[in-house]
């Protein structure tokens, strides 16, 4: 029996980005766009499906709702992608959209063009299997997060953002400036006020530091 962990894709997201840049038809099917904080991108525009690759900045996968700002279910950073489902599904209406949490830059790619590149670059098609497996892991993590108490959700969110998006230094892990109290509240389904209260408790306990800004995780083992 073949287990997925025994196989590995011959291509990565960063390699796929390189293939797009190097393709002679790049300008015809791809474009680079800069985004401002709060800008929302969907992976469908008119009759054309688009896939986004993040070149810089931090984005949130957002579930739209009646609130002014929808809840965030996942964070995406450099060399992450959004909308790859279009490569393998004829009909897919996404419930989620991607929102820039600060200034960022993305590459917008026509999905048909991208599929042709992926088809040429990889023989075993394990890239999409691994991509969907990562999506599943993120969904499982988010589902588990909802069962924790509010303070624990915030602590785990701080650690996750630090490990995946932060900068490791001798003093600890520096969180990106885009990970604000409002963003943490949207990810943990709590209020900004409660996030602020929890952050102050963590500062008083010496687990994180807020001076100088941005937040610094000093003792990640206690989160």
Image (cartoon, rainbow, N blue to C red):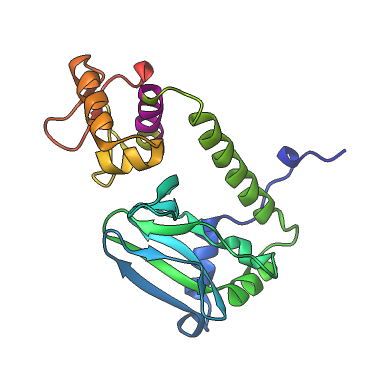
- Residue at the farthest front position: 66
Instruction: Give the residues in magenta.
Output: 151-160
Nearer to me, 151 or 167: 151
- Residue at the farthest left position: 212
Residue 123, by quadrant, is bottom right
User: Which residue is rendered at x = 39% and y = 37% of the image?
Assistant: 189
Residue 133: tell me if it is visible: yes
Nearer to me, 128 or 18: 128
Q: Does 118 appear in magenta?
A: no
Residue 74, compared with residue 220, is above or below; it is: below
Q: Does 156 appear in magenta?
A: yes
Residue 41, by quadrant, is bottom left
Q: Residue 115, image x and y in percent?
A: 64, 70
Tell me if 3 is positioned left or right of 113 in this view: right
Q: Residue 12, image x and y in percent?
A: 57, 55
Report how many numbered discs are placed on residues in the image: 0
Chief SS of the magenta region = helix
User: Which residue is rendered at x = 38% and y = 73% of the image?
Assistant: 32
Residue 171: tell me if it is visible: no
Residue 89, compared with residue 206, is above or below; it is: below
Tell me if 15 is positioned left or right of 77 in this view: right
Residue 162, compared with residue 116, is above or below; it is: above
Q: Residue 180, image x and y in percent?
A: 25, 42
Q: Residue 220, image x and y in percent?
A: 34, 22
User: Which residue is rendered at x = 67% and y = 52% of the image?
Assistant: 9
- Looking at the rendering, in which quadrant would you find the N terminus? top right
- Looking at the rendering, in which quadrant would you find the C terminus? top left
User: Which residue is rendered at x = 22% and y = 33% of the image?
Assistant: 215
């Amino acid at each position: 029996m073949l287990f997925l962990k025994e196989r590995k894709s011959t291509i990565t997201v960063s390699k796929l980005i390189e293939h797009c840049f190097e393709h002679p038809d790049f300008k015809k099917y791809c474009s680079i766009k800069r985004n401002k904080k709060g800008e929302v991108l969907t992976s469908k525009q008119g009759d054309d499906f688009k896939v986004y690759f993040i070149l810089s900045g931090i984005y949130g996968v957002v579930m739209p709702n009646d609130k002014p700002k929808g809840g965030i279910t996942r964070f995406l950073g450099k060399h992450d992608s959004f909308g790859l489902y279009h490569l393998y599904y004829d009909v897919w209406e996404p419930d989620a959209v991607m929102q820039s949490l600060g200034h960022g830059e993305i590459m917008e790619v026509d999905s048909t063009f991208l599929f042709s590149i992926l088809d040429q670059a990889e023989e075993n098609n394990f890239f999409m299997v691994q991509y969907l497996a990562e999506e599943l892991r993120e969904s499982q993590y988010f589902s588990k997060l909802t069962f924790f108490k509010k303070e624990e959700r915030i602590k785990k969110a701080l650690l996750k953002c630090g490990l995946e998006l932060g900068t490791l230094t001798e003093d600890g892990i520096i969180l990106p400036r885009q990970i604000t109290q409002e963003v943490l509240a949207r990810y943990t389904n709590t209020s900004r006020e409660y996030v602020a209260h929890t952050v102050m408790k963590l500062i008083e306990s010496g687990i994180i530091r807020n001076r100088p800004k941005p937040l610094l995780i000093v003792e990640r083992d206690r989160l």
